[in-house]
């Protein structure tokens, strides 16, 4: 684990140089996993895999690591002694039991470097003051990562976390941040709150919004409604960033806003189909990440459960690194309708565009093997909006005709917000 920063400019190097650097780091990572992770050590032995023979070209010889593996063998993934662990976070598990992810001092430095690279990409500098509207505690890593990243950049942070709209308004008035990091739907609410209080969001001095946790764009990289709204309300540049506790790597959009840049010295990303076959650039499948240079809990070919695609074309910003497209959905939420597949996100986008809809959720049941039954429950703030009208809008966009039910707003809210979740729950899977 040598100096983190030696590959600082690798994103701008030729694809050949990027590949060489990745090959070297991948080899080191494999050797580290074999030597220090009892999970991978025994996996290699059991499968009679010679890690020295694995390269980027035959990476698919390595088995995937899934969330359920980390859940089942959580402590076997730890590659350092307890005295080297400096931070332990919890990540939601596939069966509801959270998994522990442990970081060393080096991992936190790596996290800081990773976020710094991401923030530099979207144009943040040491002159920026960044308001964090995500939590720093509760065993989550995101807030800590952004804090460390802004610090590495030399900027200032305001850690107002999951505070009230009113509190954020006061902070914005007093401390005059130039950027905010937060969940898009919350940032929209916050902007509207500022406007309603007569302190216009567009005149607040916020120039950039870095969005986490929810998608901003569709598969054509066009803004979803929430992205458009944010740009309009704040008159700010809106960027999306993607990460998870396990992959300890972030893919953030640059100024060109055309996918999240991969940092080649920090992660290898593959896209795979249902059978685990690696897909070519541009094709949609599950995102698989091998984070490089991780000490605490190194992983190989981690299946994120998220669906997206890779963009190879050189970016307008000059970086030669691959980019990850927007997250189109969770793999396990994929629905089958009349021979095609779709994710709840596509339906959300449609519903978001109908101004009369104030709240909504979707349920899905499986009646036949080849087709799922989708029902959409909505609350409307305009009595002239009918179920038929909503159904027709969805049919025009997505070529499916789900059943629509207009119900009391309270009932929709009960479903969406009552559960003990970090985010609104709009998808109820009864398959
Ligand atoms: Zn770029």
Image (cartoon, grey):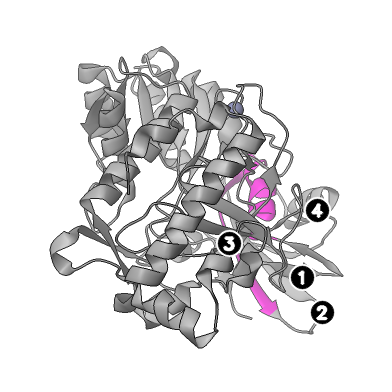
Tell me the quarter of the picture where residue 334 sits.
Answer: bottom right
Dot 1 falls on a residue whose secondary structure is strand
Dot 4 falls on a residue whose secondary structure is helix
Q: Ligand 1 sits in which quadrant?
A: top right
The residue range painted magenta reads 343-365
Task: Name the mark nearer the viewer: 4 or 1.
Answer: 1
Which of the pair 166/28 is nearer the observer? 28
Which residue carries the number 4 mark?
Answer: 398
Which residue carries the number 1 mark?
Answer: 336
**Residue 167 horizontal/vertical position (percent):** 22, 33
Q: Is label 4 in contact with label 2 (beta carbons under 8 Å)? A: no
Dot 3 or dot 4, earlier in sequence: 4
Does label 1 point to a residue whose CB lies under 8 Å from ligand 1? Answer: no
The answer for how far apart the CA atoms under marks 4 and 1 are is 12 Å
Task: Name the mark nearer the viewer: 2 or 3.
Answer: 2
Residue 46 horizontal side relative to residue 115, left or right: right
């Amino acid at each position: 684990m040598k100096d983190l920063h030696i590959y600082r400019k690798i994103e701008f190097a030729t694809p050949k140089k990027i590949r060489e650097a990745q090959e070297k780091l991948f080899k080191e990572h494999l050797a580290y996993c074999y030597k220090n992770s009892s999970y991978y050590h025994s996996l290699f032995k059991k499968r009679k895999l010679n890690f020295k023979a694995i390269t980027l070209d035959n990476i698919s010889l390595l088995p995937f690591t899934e969330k359920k593996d980390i859940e089942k063998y959580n402590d076997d993934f730890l590659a350092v002694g307890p005295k080297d662990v400096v931070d332990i976070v919890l990540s939601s598990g596939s069966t509801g039991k959270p998994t522990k992810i442990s970081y060393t001092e080096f991992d936190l430095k790596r996290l800081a470097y990773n976020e710094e690279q991401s923030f530099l990409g979207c144009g943040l500098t040491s002159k920026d003051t960044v308001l964090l509207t995500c939590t720093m505690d509760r065993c989550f890593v995101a807030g800590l990562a952004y804090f460390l990243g802004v610090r590495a950049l030399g900027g200032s942070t305001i850690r107002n976390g999951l505070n009230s709209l009113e509190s954020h308004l006061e902070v914005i008035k007093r401390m005059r941040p130039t950027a905010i990091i937060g969940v898009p739907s919350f940032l929209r609410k916050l902007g509207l709150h500022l406007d309603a209080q007569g302190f216009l969001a567009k005149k607040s001095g916020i120039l950039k919004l870095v969005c986490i946790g929810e998608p901003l764009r569709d598969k054509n990289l066009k803004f979803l409604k929430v992205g458009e709204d944010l740009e309009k309300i704040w008159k700010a540049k809106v960027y999306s960033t993607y990460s998870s506790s396990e992959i300890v790597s972030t893919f953030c959009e640059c100024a060109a806003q055309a996918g999240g840049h991969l940092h080649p010295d920090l992660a290898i990303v593959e896209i795979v189909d249902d059978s685990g076959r690696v897909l070519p650039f541009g094709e949609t499948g599950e995102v698989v990440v091998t984070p490089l240079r991780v000490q605490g809990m190194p992983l190989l070919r981690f299946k994120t459960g998220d669906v997206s695609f890779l963009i190879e074309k050189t970016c307008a910003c000059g970086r030669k690194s691959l980019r990850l497209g927007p997250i189109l959905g969770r793999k396990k939420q994929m629905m089958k309708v009349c021979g095609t597949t779709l994710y709840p996100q596509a339906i959300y986008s449609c519903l978001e565009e109908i101004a009369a809809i104030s709240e909504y959720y979707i349920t899905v049941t499986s009646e036949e093997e080849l087709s799922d039954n989708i029902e959409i429950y909505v609350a409307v703030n305009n009595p002239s909006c009918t179920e038929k009208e909503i159904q027709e809008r969805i049919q025009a966009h997505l070529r499916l005709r789900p059943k629509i039910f207009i119900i009391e707003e309270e009932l929709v809210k009960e479903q969406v917000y009552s559960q003990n979740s970090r985010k609104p729950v709009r998808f109820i899977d009864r398959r």
